[in-house]
Image (cartoon, grey):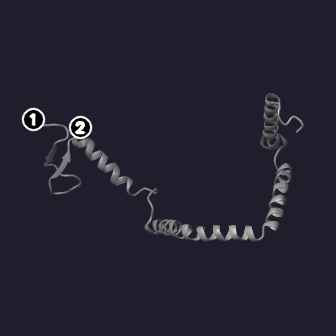
Amino acid sequence: MSTSSELVESPTTMSGASYPTVTVDMGFSQSQTDEIVAAITSAGSGNYLWTFKSFWYIAVILTALTIIVPIVAGGTFRALLRFSYNHQHYWHFAALVIILAVPIVLDIFIPPLIFLLIFAFPQWFFCALQLRKAQRTRKKMKR
């Protein structure tokens, strides 16, 4: 009595090996298994594989970023908050300048239709919702 998941010892050799191999019977014939192994071994010389040097470049960068960045980010965020609190008058002025400058610069460089879609239509929609709410509740009608 044999099942499909039973281990079968195969007396045939694969790729010149002189020892018997133990395989799991998955319904593949020996020629199909040999073709799969040949495809895997021939793919090993493809251009998509990384060199050891490329692997180390990526591994060192990822390791440094996952260790150093979280350590540095906490102190940097705390220093930025402390700076913004100590110099809040300059910070408020800088935020005002940025808030006014960004739409002006974008108006120059973005086509008019896209600029209207990004800035004008959401404001109009918000105003229409507020007017509808004021008419419905009869509150803040003067605004």
Q: Residue at x 83, y 58 (%)?
A: 96
Which quadrant of the view contains residue 118? top right
Residue indicated by mark 2? 27
Location of residue 32 in the rendering, given as x and y in whole percent from the top left corner: 27, 41
Location of residue 131 in the rendering, given as x and y in whole percent from the top left corner: 83, 33
Mark drawn on residue 1: 1
Q: Nearer the viewer, residue 108 or 135?
A: 135
- Left or right relative to 47: residue 143: right
Q: Earlier in the sequence, mark 1 or mark 2?
A: 1
Mark 1, residues whose alpha carbon is within 10 Å: few (<14), some, or many (≥20)?
few
What amino acid type should be assigned to the residue bearing mark 1?
Met
Figure check: 57 above or below 137: below
Element marked by disc 1: loop
What amino acid type should be assigned to the residue bearing mark 2?
Gly
Q: Nearer the viewer, residue 125 or 61?
A: 125
Mark 2, residues whose alpha carbon is within 10 Å: few (<14), some, or many (≥20)?
few
Element marked by disc 2: loop
